[in-house]
Amino acid sequence: MNDDSMDIAWCKCNPPQRPPPQSGVRVAVGIGPVRERWILVQIMEKVCSTALNKSGIPGMDYCLNPYTGCGHACAYCYASFMKRFCNISERWGSFVQVKVNFADRLESQLRRASPGRVMLSSVTDPYQPVEEQYRLTRSCLERLAEREMTVSILTKSDLVLRDLSLLKQLPRVEVGFTITVADDDTASILEPGATPPGRRFQAMATLAEAGIATWVFIAPVLPGLGDTEGNLTAILKKAAQSGAREVEYDSLNFYPSAVANLKHLFKQHWPRLLPGFLADCADPGLYRDQLRHLAADLWPTYGYTC
Ligand code: SF4
């Protein structure tokens, strides 16, 4: 099989017939159903040379990205710049590169690594649908459980519950759930491949009850849609009910590709909100200031600081 050959198969949860791992092999497979419909993701297996990378994110020493690409296919995804590094022309959200030797590389690197805080993940979702088959995130957690690392997981999936017993074995771990909108239907337009927010909150409550530290990341806050008092209040309320220890937020990164994708969705689904969205995009600095004031008003009501 070479780079151009493609074996397409629709399947529910069985792994594709995988060839021996080698860089550039492509296998296409249907992942789903996600909310009663099928999401098609093209899977490409590859061999990686490093797994544990230094992180530039404040508070994080390392990051682990077992996959390149993400089947959650969020319209606002900032990570689409990763396409440049893997020489892929397909639409972001339609493919996932699976680094099949990732856990082995991690194990090898951990032998020499200083203790620190490890983020899973920074440019992909560690519990996106392909994780159900490939279990790379789980394999990483198994390796990390033997080390003095602090693990910080950030996801939009309740698949993290599969690893609850493993999470309990980690010396220090926290699980963050990204929530942009509280409403499941709106989220299904913005984040078509991700677990609906209602199920994310349920997963958070289950983890919190099990003693795992959890938090909510409202990111990106979407102008005109995610920044309404109604949406932010609904998220804060559910976060408190679900046992989240903190709620943080981040404004939309006004990357041209993200703005263009969102503009398209606003035109299609929320045309009356489009003028407000465009006005906020025109002055990101002013928008962030307004958001800061709104957050300062709302967060304390639910016992959070921002
Ligand atoms: S879950 Fe994160 S990495 Fe995946 S598509 Fe959405 S924003 Fe991008």
Image (cartoon, rainbow, N blue to C red):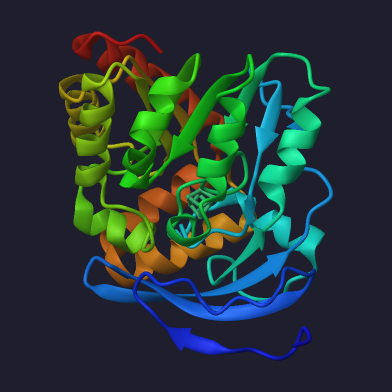
Front one among 295 and 168: 168
| Residue 70 percent location from the top left of the image | 54, 58
Taking the image as shown, residue 161 lies to the left or right of residue 166, namely left
The residue under the point 34% across, 20% down is 212
Nearer to the camera, 157 or 297: 157
- The image quadrant that residue 55 belongs to is top right
Tell me if residue 120 can be seen.
no
| Of residues 115 and 56, the one drawn nearer to the viewer in this rendering | 115
Residue 78: % across, % down: 60, 49
| Residue 40, image quadrant | bottom left
Q: Determine whether 53 is above or below 65 in the image.
A: above
Q: Quadrant of residue 206?
A: top left
Describe residue 277's horizontal placement relative to residue 108 as left or right. left
Write the residue at 32% across / 14% down: 245
Say which of 146 and 268 sits in front. Answer: 146
At horizontal 71% and vertical 53% (from top left) the residue drawn is: 101
Number of numbered callouts drawn: 0
Q: Residue 17: percent from the left, percent from the top?
A: 55, 79
172 is higher (above) or lower (below) than 165: above
**Quadrant of the image containing the C terminus:** top left
Q: Decide if residue 291 is on the left or right side of residue 94.
A: left
Query: Can you say whether 121 is above or below 209 in the image?
Result: below
* Residue 274: x %, y % from top left: 36, 58
Q: Residue at x 67, y 33 (%)?
A: 63
Classify the position of the N terminus by image quarter: bottom right
Q: Say if residue 43 shows up in the picture.
A: yes
